[in-house]
Every structure is written in structure tokens, then in C-alpha cells.
Image: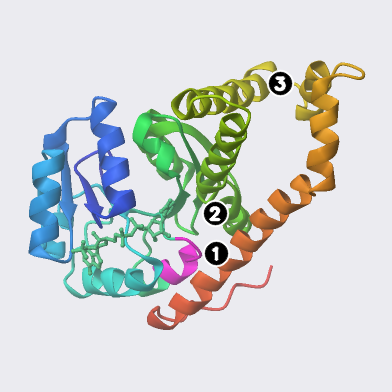
Amino acid sequence: MDTNARLAVVGLGTMGRTLVRGLLDAGRDPSGIVGVARREESARDAAEQLGIDAATDLADACASAGTILLCVKPKQLADVVSELAACDALDHDPLLVSIAAGVATRAIEATARRELPVVRAMPNTPCRIGEGMTVLSAGRSAADAHLDVAEALFTPLGRVLRLDEEHMDAVTGLSASGPAFVYVIIEALSEGGVMVGLPRAAATELAAQMVQGAARMVLESGKHPAALKDEVTTPAGCTISALLALEDGRLRSVLARGVQEATVAAARLGERSASGFREPPPRSVR
Ligand SMILES: NC(=O)c1ccc[n+]([C@@H]2O[C@H](COP(=O)([O-])OP(=O)(O)OC[C@H]3O[C@@H](n4cnc5c(N)ncnc54)[C@H](OP(=O)(O)O)[C@@H]3O)[C@@H](O)[C@H]2O)c1
């Protein structure tokens, strides 16, 4: 089956629209994408905003799609996969790519009732501007060729990394939830600038560009963040004064614990949505 054929995007909420917009801005042909929402109003609105075909008939949209990108909430996913299986919309063996937090590929595979290639993907909202971070992991029937197709889908949206599925909740806690942490950090830095007299707009621009620049230094220099921090920190200078104040406020452990909390919450999301899925078969003993 040609998994590069039409892309069906099931779920046109925040993430479905973010990914479609990112793909269209990266040059993907809108006629090769069909969107599906639950409510007519939602489908109509997305079709207007995005310029793609969008409807509410799940089976019709997915029956000829080479790749089905599942962008519904974790608790909605079991119903969507069950419906697709019940109406034979998976009989042509499409590639299923799920971005649902916490939901294991094994649960999706069992509910699909077929030996289908399933790839779990965890993108983030900066995919909207081609600066996303997406991690992929393969289900039991997904070969490297399927991961290649998923990687080709997400590469125009930013960086892509492949990791074992056991890491997916941690990925959710770090790079999927992370943009929200960084927005709060930028806002706080901007407040600091305002506190010492900068105009608000200038303070926000300084903070955001500084965060972007520092992030790119980490990615492009290959240096450890601590080494880069040392380069900024002159003896008896202003940076070390600030760093010690930040350590007094336990900045590092607060941020690290935030990632840990989000990871635990992602796992809980999967547990809460598990009841709708068919029980996966027991793992074979090796
Ligand atoms: N938010 C993030 O930063 C982020 C990052 C990575 C991954 N994720 C994952 O992305 C997924 C989507 O999150 P979201 O915030 O985009 O959710 P959302 O805004 O609530 O959107 C869900 C969409 O799914 C549609 N839908 C629900 N049931 C459906 C059905 N049976 N058939 C067709 N469409 C159906 C809804 O249609 P209606 O509009 O008609 O109700 C809606 O368009 C979640 O699983 C989440 O874990 C989110």
C-alpha cells in the first residue's frame, strides 16, 4: 500500500489544525489532505480556515487515506479506532499515526482488530511554525519503512527523533508540555525587565529572542548547557549574582519536577482512557 497517498487528519482541534497549518505552510498540497471533526460546524470552520476538505464522515475520509493521523483526545481515541474498524475503513491497511498522550500503540492495535502498522508520535505546538519537536516510536507491526513515512510527515514541521515507546510519557512531559513552561519563563523574564524599567514590548522581545538564541546555541554548538552557562558567567559579575539568586529559589529542581509531574500526568491520561480500548493480547515470552 502506498502510505504516501492521501493524508486523513482525524480531529481538527488545537493540534489537528496546528499540524495541518504547519504542513500547508511547508508546501504540502491541500488537495492531498482531508480533515475529520465530530461536529459539522467544526469541520466547516476548519475547511474554511485551512482550505482543505473536511467533513464528519470518518469512514468516508479514511477509507482511501494512506496515512491516518489521529489527533483526537486520548479519551476519544478508542471510539474513533473502533468506529474505523467497524466500518471496514482500515481494510486497506493504512498507516495509523496517533499523537494521543499516554495511549500505547498496543491498545490501538488491539482495537483496530487487524495487524496494522501503528506509529505513536508526540509533536508540540511549535510545529505550527516549522520549529516543532516530534518523537516517533513504532508499534509491533510498524517497520522502518512506516517510521520513514511518519518521519517524512513530521520533518517539514521541525526536528524528529525516534525513541522506544517506553519513553513517550517522558517525551510528553518534556517537549510536548514544555512550550507552556517556556512561555511562563519568557513572561517572567519580561516582568523582570519591566520591573527594572524596560518597556513591556521590548522586554518581551528581548526575553523571547534571548531564549531562542540560547536554545540554538545548545543545539548548534553541541556544547553542554553548563559549559555555555560558564561562558556567560564572569567572576564577580552580574550573571553569577543572578544565578545564585535563582538557585536560592530552586529554579532547577522546580523545572525538573515540572517535567516529572507532566510525565506522571501523561501516564495517568493513558490509564484513564484505557477502558475504551480492547485488551491487548499478552506479550509473547522470549
Ligand atoms: N496540546 C498539545 O500541545 C499537544 C501536544 C502533543 C499531543 N497532543 C495530543 O493531541 C491530541 C488532540 O489534542 P487537542 O488539544 O488538539 O484536542 P481538541 O482541541 O479537543 O480537538 C479534538 C478534536 O477531535 C475531534 N473529534 C473528537 N471525537 C471525534 C470523532 N469521533 N470523530 C472525528 N473527530 C473527533 C473534535 O471534533 P469537534 O471539534 O467537532 O468536537 C476536535 O476537532 C490529544 O490526544 C493530545 O494528547 C496535544
Q: Amino acid at mark 1?
A: Ala
Q: Residue at x 84, y 46 (%)?
A: 248
- Counting other residues with Cα less than 10 Å from the Cα at mark 2, is it few (<14), some (14-19), or many (20 or more)? many
Report the magenta residues as a range: 101-109
**Which residue is tagged 1?**
266
Q: Residue at x 81, y 16 (%)?
A: 231
Count of numbered labels shown in the rendering: 3
CB-based contact (under 8 Å), mark 1 and mark 3? no
Q: Is residue 254 visible?
A: yes
Image quadrant where residue 48 sits: top left
Give the number of the disc on residue 222: 3
Q: Residue at x 73, y 53 (%)?
A: 254
| Above or below, 17 relative to 285 | above
Viewer-nearest residue: 93 or 228: 228
Q: Where, quadrant-wise, is the C terminus in this rendering?
A: bottom right
SS for callout 3 = loop
Viewer-nearest residue: 46 or 273: 46
Mark found first going from the N terminus, 2 or 3: 2
Q: Is 185 colored magenta in this rendering? A: no
Give the number of the disc on residue 172: 2
Q: CA distance from mark 2 to mark 1?
A: 7 Å
